[in-house]
Amino acid sequence: MTSGRPRITPTIKISALSLFLAVSTTTYAAWDELGSNEFMTVMIDKASIKKTGDKVQVRSMLDLKKPGVEPKTKAPVNSIIGLNEYHCGQVQYRPLEVKFMAGKKGTGKVIDEIKTPDSSFEAVVSGDWSAGVYNFACRP
């Protein structure tokens, strides 16, 4: 005889845990503001910083002041979360993964996610959002 309550099977528990972990790494990161301009606010997750020699990996977020459009789906995007690797000595960076988010400050539905672990390094451009993250992550 059942009590009328739904049974929580191991599969449901694992799925719920996976969902929590996926949401918590995006939404509940401790974002610190680095700066802003008329288009966006740049934030960084200080706890995500991992240094290996002259390279640093860090998660950053661009919180858009006006919604953008995700290129593939044409869906509105209000924030972009990226994991980037910076080569501090060469003043270069490369994207490792990026998530286009429906909500502000990394909330809401993930519109698209792109992983590029083999991307090439490119120059950090002064005045660009990547320069602000570089200056924070690569400082001695």
Image (cartoon, grey):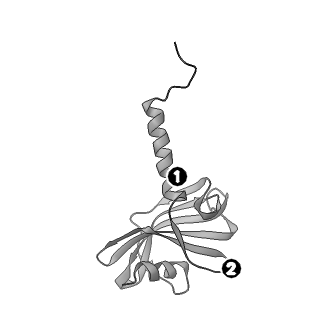
Judging from the image, what secondary structure is the residue with disc 2 in?
loop
Q: Is residue 53 left or right of residue 75?
A: left
Query: Of 123 and 52, which appears nearest the observer?
Result: 52
- The residue carrying pointer 2 sits among few (fewer than 14), some (14 to 19) or many (20 or more) residues within 10 Å by Cα, namely few
In space, the residues marked 2 and 1 are separated at their CA atoms by 28 Å
Q: Is residue 103 left or right of residue 3?
A: right
Residue 23 image label: 1
Amino acid tagged 1: Val
Q: How many marks?
A: 2
Picture quarter with the C terminus: bottom left
Residue occupying the far right of the picture: 66
Query: Residue visible at 67% across and 76% down?
Result: 39
- The residue carrying pointer 1 sits among few (fewer than 14), some (14 to 19) or many (20 or more) residues within 10 Å by Cα, namely some
Judging from the image, what secondary structure is the residue with disc 1 in?
helix
Q: Is residue 90 left or right of residue 66?
A: left
- Name the residue tied to disc 2: 38
Q: Is residue 131 left or right of residue 68?
A: left
Mark toward the start of the polypeptide (2 vs 1):
1
Q: Position of residue 24 (x, y in %)?
A: 50, 54
Amino acid tagged 2: Glu
Where 21 sits versus 12, above or below? Answer: below
Residue occupying the far top of the picture: 1
Query: Residue visible at 52% across and 58% down?
Result: 26
Q: Position of residue 111 (x, y in %)?
A: 60, 55
Q: Position of residue 133 (x, y in %)?
A: 48, 78
Query: Residue visible at 37% across and 81% down?
Result: 88
